[in-house]
Image (tube, helix red, strand yellow):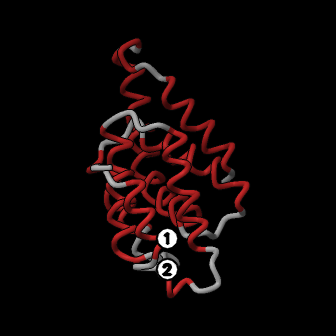
Amino acid sequence: ITIRFLAMLISALKSISLESLDDGQKQLIVPVIDYINRSFRGEILISLVTLSCCGILPLDAVTDFASLIQQILSPSQWQDVEASISAAFCTNQFLLGDEVKTVAIATFKRCIESKYPASTFADMITDMWNMHQTDDTGAIAGGEAVLQFVKKFSKDR
């Protein structure tokens, strides 16, 4: 599955106005949409978040992944994606410690609950990507870069 395909799928699903459908159309379309949401959203989010936030992607793909993550999050309810987002930060690839994980998860939640600027969200993911690129990732958790990240993206800043 390519990023372009996922973005097109999300765009197509968002374009469906259930209010404009008659009952017969709703009976046919709603189960398909529910199936897509149940089957793919969780696993896709885990993969997208892990690949981007853990520094696995090439840098030039990070912004596109951040945009796709926001597209997935925008129509979602937090309770529907919380487990997937949390799982992505509990992998062996995430090396930045609990402080960054807590701030990042809270930022993902804010993206759903309010209009969070796309550029700020992409900056957060890029900052995590950059921190994973250091040669001494073991020294990152609790280090200066983490403290700056927490200060920059904490809700109370």
- Is residue 89 toward the left or the right of residue 122 in the image? left
- Is residue 5 toward the left or the right of residue 148 in the image? right
Numbered disc total: 2
In the rendered image, the vertical position of residue 61 relative to residue 33, given as above or below: below
Badge 2 density bin: few <14, some 14–19, many ≥20, Cα 10 Å: some
Q: Residue at x 51, y 23 (%)?
A: 15
Circle 2 — which element?
loop
Image quadrant in which you'd find residue 4: top right
- Going by the numbered disc 1, the residue's amino acid type is Ala
Percent position of residue 13, x then y = 50, 31
Residue holding disc 2: 140
Observer-nearest of 146 and 7: 146
- Is residue 63 toward the left or the right of residue 20 in the image? right
In the rendered image, the vertical position of residue 14 relative to residue 53, given as above or below: above
Observer-nearest of 98 and 39: 98
Circle 1 — which element?
helix
Residue holding disc 1: 145
Image quadrant in which you'd find residue 153: bottom left
Determine which of the numbered discs, if any, sits on residue 102 in the image. Answer: none
Cβ atoms under marks 1 and 2 closer than 8 Å: yes
Mark 1–mark 2 Cα distance, whole angstroms, equals 7 Å
Q: Residue at x 40, y 69 (%)?
A: 147
Badge 1 density bin: few <14, some 14–19, many ≥20, Cα 10 Å: some
